[in-house]
Amino acid sequence: MALSALAVHELAETVLGCVCAGLEDTAAAVEDQPGCPCRACVVPGPPAWDGCNDPCGDETGGQLSVHVARIYASSAFPTEDREVRGARNCPPPTTTAADLVVTLLRCAPTADERGCPPGCEELAAAARTVHVDAVSINNALLCCLPTTGTRRRGPRFVLGPSRILESEGGCMGVEQRLTVALPGCGCPKEESP
């Protein structure tokens, strides 16, 4: 069965929706924790770090993005299939895998107008926000993604490491990687070689 032309993009949108909903749930449960940023989108590659400020005029601020890092064939998910294709009677791989990257950026404490560095309380509050964001993203993917899809259960996936991003240009954040299996990848029978 051929993979739908929109399958990978729809997967990225689903992941974005799961994470945004998870951030909102956390904001409702954890005092002073910002929710899903108003700037939340699927992007064509690694995000530009230009949206960690507060473009909406509310307290959520930041930028949440999902991008596809790579797409590959897999006969034994999540291992990349390295079989040479093109020979007669060569079955197509059973799975297409997609590596996705979730990036959440928030404003980082910076030096004040006199050039003094942020204080320990301000840094601790920023660290708390980033740590809660990391756990929220992880929980959102583990709890929401299995409930998506048209089959009885959601897609198979491997949750990769979560990484706290170094502060840069007034932004700080979290990056979460995951690999998701999508069924089908071969040509329809009438198009098979």
Image (cartoon, rainbow, N blue to C red):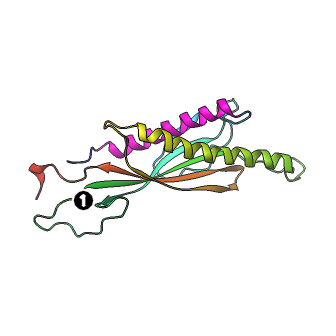
Q: Which residue is mark 1?
A: 93
Residue 90 x, y percent position in the rendering: 15, 64
Residue 82 x, y percent position in the rendering: 29, 69
Mark 1, other Cα within 10 Å: few <14 / some 14–19 / many ≥20: many
Q: Residue at x 32, y 49 (%)?
A: 182
Vertical relation: 78 (above or below) 134: below
Image quadrant assignment for residue 99: bottom left
Residue 13 seen in render: no
- Residue 14 lies left or right of residue 57; in this view the side is left
Q: Residue at x 22, y 48 (%)?
A: 2
Residue 5 x, y percent position in the rendering: 28, 44
- Foreground of the two, 187 or 22: 22
Q: Residue at x 57, y 42 (%)?
A: 64
Residue 26 x, y percent position in the rendering: 63, 35
Identified by mark 1, the residue type is Pro
Name the magenta segment's main secondary structure.
helix
Residue 16 inside the magenta-drawn segment = yes
- Residue 80 lies left or right of residue 102; in this view the side is left
- Residue 4 lies left or right of residue 128; in this view the side is left
Image quadrant assignment for residue 94: bottom left
In the displayed orientation, state which residue is furthest to the front.
Answer: 152
Give the number of callouts: 1
- Residue 160 lies left or right of residue 182; in this view the side is right
Residue 175 seen in render: yes
In magenta, the rendered stretch is 5-30
Q: Residue at x 31, y 61 (%)?
A: 76
| SS category of the residue bearing label 1 | loop
Which quarter of the image is occupied by the C terminus?
bottom left
Residue 24 inside the magenta-drawn segment = yes
